[in-house]
Structure formats: C-alpha cells, structure tokens
Amino acid sequence: MKKLIAGIALFGTFAIASAQTITFDKTTFDYGTIKPSSDGTRFFTVTNTGDKPLVISNVKPSCGCTTPEFSTDPVMPGKSAKIKVGYNTALNGPFNKMIEVFSNDPSNSRSVIYIKGNVDANAAEVAVAPAKVETPVDAKAAKKAAKAAKKATAAK
C-alpha cells in the first residue's frame, strides 16, 4: 500500500512539473497621465514557459470601460501571444482596472493583470515620431555601406 501511495505521489509531482505554465511580461501596465480620447490600447505579452500547449480560455475585464481581445489558439511551449487591452479614455479621472485571464495552467488557472493611469485634459501632449519608411534606394544604400564595412574589416 505504501508503494502505491508513493507511486501516485511521484506521478502527481511529474504531472505538475510537465505542464503548461502562463507567464506575463508585466502584470500592471501604467498609462501614466494621458489626454481624454487618446489611444487607450495596450498589449500584455503572455509566454508559455511550460512544455505543453497553453490555452487562454477567457479574459474578463472588471468593468465595461475596458475591452480585452485575445486568441484562443494554443500557445506552444516557449512561444508567446498578446492580449490586447483597450481602455475608454473618454472617461476623465484616475483609473485602476483589473482583468482576469483564465487558462489551462493547472497551478494558475486564473491570473490577474491590471491597467492604471489618469485621464486628464491638462496632460502634456505626447509627441509620437513618425515611422521611417525605408525606400528601395535607402535599402540599397544600407546594403552597400554594410558590404563596404565588411570588406574594410576583412582587409585588416
């Protein structure tokens, strides 16, 4: 009987050790102070640090002012996925919202992430630099420069 109990305990330990495990890049996203009607979309990165596929079954916000989007596709071991969270920035004032993430992680089937910040009409403008669009001419020039640098290094 003792051997049977020891065997079950050993198997249970192995089953827990070899499972899907949910890990977040951060559990709180601080928006800081933002202007009303600014972009309220942020992303949390979820990584499966286990050795079996991780499935996010549901993401529930604490109120209707927060809208999460997620994929129910399995996250393979070592891979990551994004949870998109939107906050209604038309609502003035401070906010601190909870979002529940439900998955098939056996030891952490319900995880909690947070967003917080302050929507204030007097917030400073956030200057966003426009993305540089690389033209084919820029790409060719960059390749030539890299090639010349490589030749110069090889010649030494």
Image (cartoon, rainbow, N blue to C red):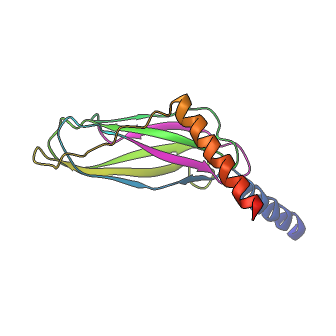
In the image, is 7 to the left or to the right of 145? right
Residue 119 falls in image quadrant: top left
- Viewer-side residue, 119 vs 145: 145
Q: Quadrant of the C terminus?
A: bottom right
Q: Is residue 45 magenta?
A: yes
In percent of width and height, residue 104 lies at 61, 44
Splitting the image into 4 quarters, where does residue 73 fall? top right
Total marks shown come to 0
Nearer to me, 111 or 75: 75
Q: Furthest-bottom residue in view? A: 2
Looking at the picture, tell me which residue is in the foreground, 140 or 22.
140
Residue plotted at (11% across, 43% down): 121
Q: Position of residue 22 (x, y in %)?
A: 59, 51
Q: Is residue 7 above or below residue 56?
A: below
Range of residues picked out in magenta: 42-63
3 is higher (above) or lower (below) than 151: below
Residue 70 lies in the magenta stretch: no
Q: 27 or 101: nearer the eye?
A: 27
Is residue 104 visible in this depiction of the protein? no
Q: Is residue 125 left or right of residue 154?
A: left
Q: Quadrant of residue 85?
A: top left
Residue 64 lies, in percent from the top left, at 29, 34
Residue 108 position, x and y percent, is 56, 54
The N terminus lies in which quarter of the figure? bottom right
Q: Residue furthest top?
A: 136
Q: Is residue 82 visible?
A: yes
